[in-house]
Amino acid sequence: MVLILAVLLRAILGPTVIDRMISINAITSKISALILLTAFAGGEYAFVDVAFVFMLCGFAGSLWIIRVLTPGDWQLRIPGLAGFEGNGEEEKAHD
């Protein structure tokens, strides 16, 4: 719990968005570990699913933070793989 509070302080004082995102991911990981330890100690293995869903929500939240709060376009750029960049238009299905 002390480590969670220390990372929470870093999330509040972090100067950049990336610092805050990393600290939120660390808090998610630590809370998931606490849920898993509680599940194994108490024999309640249904909490494993809760921890898994909590980790997935943290991952989706961090993707949202990256997508919304960081500038730049999100084009695929891999050197040496010409033709995979796309033209910005999506294929439309003709029903």
Image: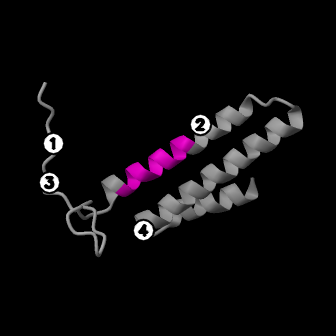
Q: Position of residue 31 (x, y in %)?
A: 68, 47
* Quarter of the figure with the C terminus: top left
Foreground tag (3 vs 2): 3
Foreground tag (3 vs 4): 3
Q: Which residue is mark 3?
A: 88
Residue drawn at the location 64% of the way across and 52% of the way down: 29
Q: Which residue is mark 1?
A: 91
Q: Amino acid at mark 1?
A: Glu
Foreground tag (1 vs 4): 1
Query: Which element is circle 1 on?
Result: loop
**CA neighbours of label 1 inside 10 A, class few (<14), some (14 to 19), many (20+):** few
Which of the two discs, 2 and 4, labels the residue nearer the N terminus? 4
Decide if residue 12 is in sight here.
Answer: no
Q: Amino acid at mark 2?
A: Val
The numbered dot on residue 16 is 4
Q: Position of residue 61 (x, y in %)?
A: 46, 47
Image vertical order of residue 31 relative to residue 45, above or below: below
Residue drawn at the location 86% of the way across and 31% of the way down: 43
Image vertical order of residue 70 relative to residue 60, above or below: below
Q: Amino acid at mark 4?
A: Thr
Image vertical order of residue 10 relative to residue 46, above or below: below
Q: Which residue is mark 2?
A: 53
Foreground tag (2 vs 4): 2
